[in-house]
Image: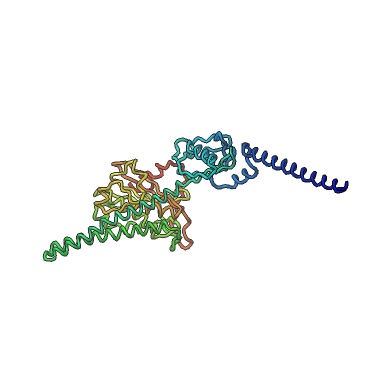
Amino acid sequence: MDTTQLALLALLLGAIIGGSVAAGIALAVRARDRAQIETSSTIPEGVHEVLRAMDEAAVVVDTSSTVLAASAPAAPFQLSEGSVLASDELRAIARRARAEESVITATLRLRRGAAPAEPRLVVARASRISARLTLLVLRDITERERVEQMRRDFVANTSHELKTPVGAVSLLAEAIESAADDPDQVRNFAGRLTAEATRLSQLTSRIMNLSRLQAADEFTDEREVAVDEIIASAADAHAIQAASAGVEIVRGGDRGLYVRGDAQVLGEAVGNLVANAIAYSPSGSSVGVGVKAVGDVVEIAVTDRGIGIAEGDQERVFERFYRADQARSRRTGGSGLGLAIVKHAVQRHGGEVRLWSRPGRGSTFTIRLPLIDPPADQVVPKRRRPKKKKTTPAAASHPTNGAPA
């Protein structure tokens, strides 16, 4: 083998050895970098930008449960950079995610805001970033669960409420058949059958009305509506009920005011308040329906001098099928849907309902709706618009709020 061949062979061996050494060094550097990343508490590049773009609460924590980075929605959960996870459940799922190198999901309750705030139902998802870093994402499902529970309760309550009149109709039909030879009994059973059928029809109608109000569709007959028209419609619809109960409906307050909405829906809402006031008022008393303009709002107050509502029941009276007085509601045929319909009808018109009540002194329900200018073709009496006053919610719904005494 000549000198040239030996030189080429040496060169080849040198290249192979040099390449191997370079490759070894490169692998060692990469292994070192990976080890540094795995053992480092430094936030990887781009994580802060991702967190800023997130609509959900998300944080990156280290092995000591210290928050190193956080999205803006995490702040209400008291999760900000530099803070420590206060929840034992969150710390536990973060440790599991790091140890098992997998995604861990758990449903738990976390307090949102200051200490008196109600705990929120949250789905927490933990995933491992490195040996020392964990990403926690929190999804608040409180409202979703509340709506789902309301849906379940609505179905259960509706089924329960429908069973009573349906069962009564069936039993009365059998009673009529068995008493065919006794005309007096037939007439008695027929009258009770008619009453149960009417109750069933009213309950079905109210369920349909409530479902329609909760739907996302817009009102089909939205226009400028005279408040006087709404009050007159409600009073006329319940004149017979008031006469039978020995209760007088008294109208007072401002006239010539207008709101925008569906006249039928608003008339039914006020009518439900009038019907309740009549049902809970003693014979010989009066139900006041007062109207007052307060700034850019129309207040329609329906006042009775009945038994009143206990403070513990006042927050729940607008719930579907809730009855503060079960026995009286049964006697009067109440469905427990009237105030729920009022609440949703008023909210769909951009307003609110307020309640003032004291046991033994009566109740005042006040509907507050946005005031609009009367149509150009309407001539209304001139009135002096009162100055807007600062009032407390209780005072705004006091019986003197535009309602006649």
Residue 291 seen anywhere in this rendered image of the structure: no
The one nearer the camera, 367 or 85, is 85
The one nearer the camera, 279 or 30, is 30
Q: Position of residue 394 (x, y in %)?
A: 40, 42
Location of residue 226 (image quadrant): bottom left
Q: Position of residue 5 (x, y in %)?
A: 85, 48
Q: Position of residue 253 (x, y in %)?
A: 38, 51
Q: Which residue shows up at 16% across the image and 65% down it? A: 177
Q: Which residue shows up at 44% across the image and 63% down it? A: 220
Residue 5 appears left or right of 105: right
Where 275 falls versus 83 (above or below)?
below
Which residue ends up furthest to the bottom in the rendered image?
181
Residue 358 appears left or right of 351: left
Q: Position of residue 49 (x, y in %)?
A: 63, 45
The one nearer the camera, 2 or 242, is 2
Residue 303 seen anywhere in this rendered image of the structure: yes
Residue 392 appears left or right of 25: left
